[in-house]
Image (cartoon, rainbow, N blue to C red):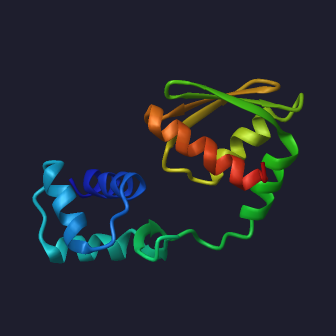
Amino acid sequence: MKLERHSKIVELIGKYEIDTQEELAERLREAGFTVTQATVSRDIRELKLTKIAMDNGKQRYTVMQSQDSHTDKYIRILQDGYLSMDRAQNILVIRTVPGMAMAVAASLDALHFHELVGCIAGDDTILCAVRSSDDTINLMEKIRKMIGI
């Protein structure tokens, strides 16, 4: 149950701009979980959630990204291998330089996008399973920002 709740919390904070424990608890209750404020507080601590400032001046919870020294390397691989991307509902197709698809797919997996379920790579094409059509659009925007286009 705890693992399911943690998974739902990560999904909720990715989907909504949740800025209080009370709002998070309410969203969890709406999703069918029985939670108390103490449970939500403990979950936030265990998931290492943090608040980030948004452009509108409000804050929201997000999963704290560890300052992994490899993150820059993964982004560089993504930048070096990427050619284009297109979507079909909740499937994202990424075209890469020939021979780079596996490295780019491994980098995408290592960057832990919550929208991304997994990738299958060929030689120059990656098929990404994404949680929903809306998440596909969000993921495409994150990738564009990451590679600077």
In the depicted structure, whether residue 95 falls above or below residue 18 = above
The spot of residue 61 in percent (x, y) is 40, 69
Horizontal side of 113 relative to 46 (left or right) equals right
The spot of residue 99 in percent (x, y) is 88, 30
In the depicted structure, whether residue 105 falls above or below residue 99 = below
Question: Which residue is located at x 70 percent, y 47 percent?
Answer: 144
Q: Between residues 24 and 59, which one lies in front from this camera angle?
A: 59
Question: Which residue is located at x 18 percent, y 48 percent?
Answer: 31
Horizontal side of 133 relative to 92 (left or right) equals left
Question: Which residue is located at x 89 percent, y 28 percent?
Answer: 98
The spot of residue 59 in percent (x, y) is 41, 75
Horizontal side of 66 relative to 35 (left or right) equals right
Horizontal side of 14 relative to 44 (left or right) equals right
Q: Number of marks in the image?
A: 0
The spot of residue 41 in percent (x, y) is 25, 77
Locate residue 92: give its quadrant.
top right
Question: Which residue is located at x 41 percent, y 75 percent?
Answer: 58
Q: Between residues 108 and 15, which one lies in front from this camera angle?
A: 15
Q: Between residues 101 and 146, which one lies in front from this camera angle?
A: 146
Locate residue 51: give its quadrant.
bottom left
